[in-house]
Image (cartoon, coloured by chain):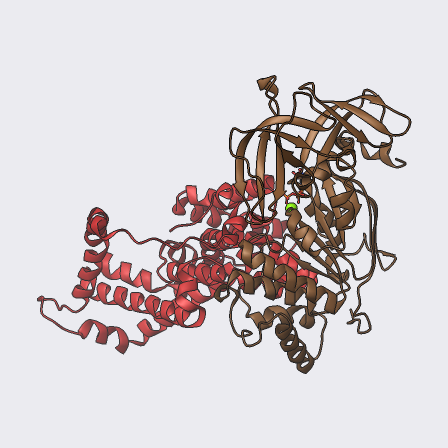
Chain colours: A red, B brown
């Protein structure tokens, strides 16, 4: 993930943009072999395992070719329900991360160096602790006799169920995904030339019009990129739904884990993984159509 | 906010003791400036002299520390940029990259809630005016630099602002394109009758376009006048040096007669006799000698007459219609060697030419030497409070 978290590096973006970003130069043909180690690394550690998973998903117990793993998945209503639920939760996580993350990223990108460093630290800190620790932290806060409910009880309000259900799941998911959303948005927003908004104002736009008609569209690559990233990560997420969601909120990843850990049914697990992958790719394709792949892959404005 | 229909002509702009200080740094110190309706005013000055800061204060992006900004007699210093109704063109155009040319130009009209049909009409007409008809569907990145510049201009003019502010709008273009756009821009300004304040650091550009030139230095106005004023009657050596080529010969006034005749001694021991009032013995001055006002001849006899310096040709440049000689005049004391630049018009073929190393005599008449104070006092050291009454 190539996120730009270094404030200094992007300060001069306006000038660079003015002189037109240099066209990416292809490596001269004679030096392509320099890429070999990197390609080999990718092949061994990414391409091969993926290939293996796809292959396994078409194998039966004896190692012959079959589509029965897929048949089994699509013929059971429970799996379809979990599939739809996974998409739904990933989608909601994306929407909430965007709603919470956009203003955060905006302030981060448009504030002075002191505020920025502090906020950046707050956003980055969760990245530096184990996800397990963070999730347990949330559980301590949200559980029936946790901090929030203690305060509520003290105020004479009734206890509310914040964990082991959909709300607990959403809190945990959005919290976990927020840094990805914020950092992706931030890197795009830092690249937006501040003069665009100034010009819009000089042309008669109020603050809101200047934001809505100029700034927001220019931040779209960040919205698209961040949403896609969060959706993909959320769709395959395991720990948070497992620990903070209810029994009815289990997602595909939990089923994969169950198949692998308990039933040792690697082939069926592979099939589910491939289905997850296809959903992800489908989303990517949809986005590419709507937003334009070029914009998605380059966070340039 | 309603669109002001009847205002198509320019409007006068007056700046009254305008100040901008950053912490303890004075970027603009007490500027007084008046630009008449429909006039083209060029603000000229070296880097860091406060040109952009002044312009941005008028546009509303920089809040003045003190002072008034009057447009049509009304103080707009407290208005936000969007309420000022001024067209602004930035150095790098700042065209909205996600909007087409048409939508860029339509933007100010949409903001003013102009009806859809009228928008289409006015945008098309504006694009025709800047000779971009038919390119409305393109995106800014699909245009050449010159075309982008025109779009920026169209966008700043389409809502018929009373004032157009431009900050080095041609700075990013090559010389040839610049000069053709300068002429177009000037013609357009005349036709639309809009008041223009135009920032540049190119004096040639300023001379080409301006009705009025303001030379800034160190946050204050060094001189304000017509191009002829500044070129022929510079107030200071700084202005003379900034407006076209000139030889600035620095020296000290040794004697000042009552009739205005000055004797100025140059550190080489040579002497300039000139006429100017307002100087007295001991003043440090600079004599401005325009290259085209100097004549060059062979030295006759050992004695140098008045305003004639002997020297040696250091370089010769052919300019086509003229020849430029660089004459080293500091021979007696080589450490103080100074060079006078002489531009001699070619008179047919019989014109006597000199070559490198020739001994020559450079002459000028008393009236060709313009005696100037070096520069106005640097005001940056004064805090704003003390400068109110200067
Ligand atoms: N925000 C700021 N904080 C402190 N100093 C500033 C600020 N903006 C401008 N200055 C200073 O004010 C002075 C005038 O700046 P300004 O941008 O007006 O110069 P300019 O005449 O437009 O120069 P150039 O020809 O290089 O564009 C400069 O010395 C600059 O460093
Ligand atoms: Mg400037």
Q: Nearer the viewer, residue A22 or A63?
A: A22
In the figure, is residue B284 to the left or right of B52?
Answer: right
| Image height of A196 relative to A281, above or below | above
Q: Is residue A17 left or right of residue A71?
A: right
Residue B48 drawn above or below residue A160:
above
Q: Height in image: B20 above or below A248?
A: above
Residue drawn at (37%, 57%) of the image: A242
User: Residue B187: where, in percent of width, then height?
Assistant: 69, 65
- Quadrant of the rendered structure where residue A129 is? top left
Q: Examine the rendered structure and indicate whether residue B387 appears above or below residue B12.
A: above
Note whether residue A159 is visible: no
The residue positioned 28% from the left and 51% from the top of the image is A27
Q: Is residue B119 left or right of B350 when viewed as pictured?
A: right
The x, y position of residue A54, in whole percent, is: 20, 65
Quadrant of res A279: bottom left
Residue B111 x %, y %:
69, 69
Q: Nearer the viewer, residue A89 or B274?
A: B274
């Amino acid at each position: 993930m190539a996120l730009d978290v270094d404030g200094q590096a992007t300060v001069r973006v306006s000038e660079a943009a003015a002189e037109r970003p240099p066209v990416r130069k292809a490596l001269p043909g004679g030096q392509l072999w320099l890429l070999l180690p990197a390609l080999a690394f990718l092949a061994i550690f990414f391409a091969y395992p993926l290939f293996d998973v796809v292959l396994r998903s078409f194998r039966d117990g004896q190692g012959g070719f079959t589509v029965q793993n897929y048949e089994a998945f699509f013929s059971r209503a429970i799996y379809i329900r979990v599939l739809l639920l996974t998409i739904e939760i990933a989608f909601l996580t994306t929407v909430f991360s965007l709603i919470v993350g956009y203003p955060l990223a905006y302030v981060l990108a448009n504030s002075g160096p002191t505020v920025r460093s502090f906020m950046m630290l707050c956003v980055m800190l969760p990245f530096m602790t184990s996800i397990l620790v963070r999730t347990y932290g949330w559980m301590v806060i949200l559980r029936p006799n946790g901090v929030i409910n203690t305060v509520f009880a003290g105020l004479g309000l009734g206890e509310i169920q914040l964990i082991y259900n959909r709300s607990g799941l959403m809190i945990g998911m959005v919290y976990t995904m927020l840094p990805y959303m914020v950092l992706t948005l931030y890197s795009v927003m830092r690249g937006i030339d501040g003069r665009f908004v100034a010009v819009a104002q000089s042309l008669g736009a109020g603050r809101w019009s200047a934001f809505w008609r100029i700034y927001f569209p220019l931040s779209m690559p960040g919205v698209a990129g961040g949403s896609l990233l969060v959706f993909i990560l959320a769709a395959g997420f395991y720990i948070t739904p497992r620990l903070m969601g209810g029994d009815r909120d289990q997602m595909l990843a939990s089923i994969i884990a169950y198949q692998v850990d308990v039933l040792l049914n690697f082939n069926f697990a592979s099939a589910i993984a491939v289905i997850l992958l296809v959903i992800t790719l489908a989303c990517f394709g949809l986005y590419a159509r709507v937003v334009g792949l070029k914009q998605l892959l380059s966070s340039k404005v | 906010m309603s669109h002001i229909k009847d205002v198509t002509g320019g409007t006068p702009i007056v700046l009254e003791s305008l100040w901008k200080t950053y912490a303890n740094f004075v970027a603009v110190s007490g500027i007084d400036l008046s630009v008449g309706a429909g006039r083209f005013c060029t603000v000229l000055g070296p880097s860091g002299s406060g040109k952009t800061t002044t312009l941005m204060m008028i546009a509303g992006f920089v809040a003045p520390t003190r002072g008034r900004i009057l447009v049509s007699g009304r103080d707009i210093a407290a208005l936000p940029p969007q309420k000022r109704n001024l067209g602004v063109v930035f150095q790098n155009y700042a065209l909205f990259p996600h909007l087409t040319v048409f939508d860029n130009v339509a933007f100010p009209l949409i903001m003013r809630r102009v009806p859809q049909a009228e928008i289409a009409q006015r945008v098309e007409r504006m694009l025709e005016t800047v000779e971009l008809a038919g390119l409305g569907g393109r995106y800014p990145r699909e245009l050449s630099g010159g075309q982008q510049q025109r779009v920026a201009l169209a966008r700043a003019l389409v809502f018929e602002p009373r004032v157009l502010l431009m900050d080095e709008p041609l700075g990013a273009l090559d010389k040839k394109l610049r000069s053709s756009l300068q002429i177009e821009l000037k013609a357009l300004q005349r036709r639309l009758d809009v008041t223009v304040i135009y920032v540049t650091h190119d004096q040639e550009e300023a001379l080409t376009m301006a009705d009025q030139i303001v030379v800034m230095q160190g946050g204050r106005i060094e001189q304000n006048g017509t191009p002829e004023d500044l070129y022929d009657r510079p107030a200071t050596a700084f202005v003379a040096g900034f407006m076209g080529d000139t030889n600035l010969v620095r020296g000290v006034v040794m004697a000042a007669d009552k009739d205005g005749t000055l004797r100025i001694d140059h550190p080489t021991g040579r002497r300039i006799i000139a006429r100017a009032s307002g100087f007295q013995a001991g003043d440090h001055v600079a004599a401005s000698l325009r290259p085209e006002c100097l004549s060059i001849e062979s030295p006759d006899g050992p004695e140098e007459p008045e305003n004639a310096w002997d020297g040696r040709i250091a370089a010769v440049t052919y300019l086509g219609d003229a020849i430029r000689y660089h004459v080293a005049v500091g021979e007696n004391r080589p450490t103080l060697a100074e060079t006078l630049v002489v531009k001699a018009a070619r008179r047919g073929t019989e014109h006597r030419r000199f070559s490198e190393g020739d001994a020559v005599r450079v002459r000028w008449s008393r009236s060709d030497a313009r005696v100037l104070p070096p520069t106005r006092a640097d005001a940056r050291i004064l805090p704003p409070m003390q400068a109110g009454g200067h």
